[in-house]
Amino acid sequence: MSDVKLIMSWDILPGREEDYFEFHIRKFVPAMEKLGLALSEAWLTVYGEQPRLLAEAKISSLASAREVLDSIGWGDLGDQMEDMVENFEYKVVPARSGFQL
């Protein structure tokens, strides 16, 4: 398998929006880049019954994705998000162009 996408979704806890968005810019994005993940798309749901945030990162291979997801850095990032988000989910899928769920 060649390029894959890590597709992530989550909801921001009520009252934590300001903290979350500051974290996202100052820590989340740099941490993803440090892990070798190239964030390619992000969506904020403003209406409807979908996760509040959807984001995807491109990864060169399934093996690389597994390495990242098993890393201490990935675990640390999850720990930092714990008190600001809920319903965090992710999956790895074969990369296609455009929006993927």
Image (cartoon, rainbow, N blue to C red):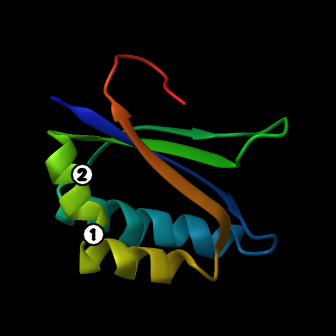
51 on left or right of 38: right
Q: Is residue 66 above or below residue 5?
A: below
Give SS at disc 1: loop
41 on left or right of 45: left
Which residue appears at 57% of the width and 38% of the height? 43
Q: Is residue 1 above or below residue 38?
A: above
Say if mark 1 contacts mark 2, CB within 8 Å: no
Which residue appears at 75% of the width and 70% of the height? 13
Snapshot quadrant of residue 73: bottom left
96 on left or right of 64: right
Disc 2 crowd, CA 10 A, few/some/many (<14, 14-19, 20+): many
Query: As shown in the figure, which amino acid type bears the numbered disc 2?
Result: Ala
Task: Give the percent coordinates (x, y) of residue 55.
Answer: 48, 44
The numbered mark at residue 84 is none
Which residue appears at 32% of the width and 28% of the height? 94
Q: Is residue 31 above or below residue 38?
A: below
Q: CA distance from mark 1 to mark 2?
A: 9 Å
Task: Give the percent coordinates (x, y) of residue 48.
Answer: 85, 35
Which residue appears at 24% of the width and 51% of the height? 65
Residue hosting label 2: 65
Mark earlier in primary sequence (1, 2): 2
Give SS at disc 2: helix
**Quadrant position of the N terminus in the picture:** top left
Camera-side residue of 41 and 73: 73
Q: Is residue 28 above or below residue 51?
A: below
Disc 1 crowd, CA 10 A, few/some/many (<14, 14-19, 20+): few
Camera-side residue of 94 and 97: 94
Task: Give the percent coordinates (x, y) of residue 38.
Answer: 25, 45
Residue hosting label 1: 70
